Image (spheres, helix red, strand yellow):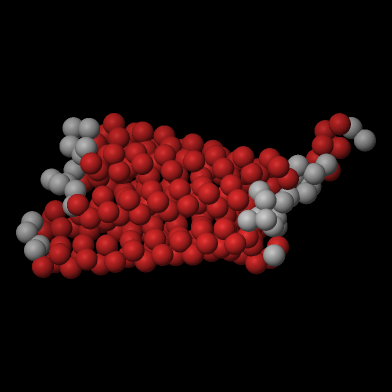
Amino acid sequence: MSTSIFSKLTPQATKFYPLLNSLAEVLVNASALMKEFIQNYTIENAEEYNKKIKALEREGDTISNTIFEELNVTFITPFDREDIHHLATCMDDVMDFINSASKRIYLYKPKRIPGSAIAMLDNLIEGSEVIREAILDLKTFKKKMKEIKEHCDKLHTIENKADDIYEHFLIDLFENPGDGVELIKLKEIMHELEKATDALEGVGKAIKIIVVKYA
């Protein structure tokens, strides 16, 4: 048997943990950068921030594609292939929505960004950090099941808080509509951020599936 064939038949489960960890790190970095973008937003600097966030989105895509490729060539995986694929896809979804919100800010050039966007990003940053901790715990999940479940519950709580922020934003927006074009711009930007926080819970559900299967 050749070395290349033998390597494909040898357990290579450990390769997926650093890849998933790297993907989680991209989410943390992108969330923090998005908050910095919103805090420092001007029409003049929007393009540069959008480029930086787009670069992180591409980095996340590269990591996700590597995970998918490894699933095709690895004989033994730490969890079901479908579950690893689903988890990576859910994490990638969060990054996609962050990038989408950034792109809308750059393209729409709103006059201002509402303060509720900062509150939304605080939840997004917290959720990304929780995901990073949950992914780290997956490596020894038999010993960390309680902690992982707590991480998933926290992601659900964060998503609920973000929903409340978005609802209050909408109430305020339509009670004080002002410029109709600006209203549409802000609503779309905030909706993308809200979808990013929804996607956080999707990651939590993907992790829960793994825990339930292998408990």
The answer to whether 8 is drawn above or below residue 210 in the figure is above
Q: Residue at x 56, y 43 (%)?
A: 21
Q: Which residue is at a point 18% across and 52% down the rendered structure image?
A: 114
Residue 45 position (above or below residue 186): above
Residue 58 at x, y percent in the picture: 46, 38
In the rendered view, tell whether residue 80 sits above or below residue 30: below
Q: Is residue 19 visible?
A: yes
Residue 104 pos. (x, y %): 27, 47
Residue 99 appears at what percent x and percent y?
37, 45
Q: Nearer the viewer, residue 154 or 190?
A: 154
Q: How many marks?
A: 0
Which of these two is toward me, 38 or 127?
127
Residue 132 shown left or right of residue 13 in the figure:
left
Nearest the camera: 48 or 38? 38
Whether residue 192 is visible: no
Q: Residue at x 32, y 50 (%)?
A: 121
Furthest-left residue in view? 178
Residue at position x 83%, y 42% in the image: 10
Q: Position of residue 180 (x, y in %)?
A: 11, 59
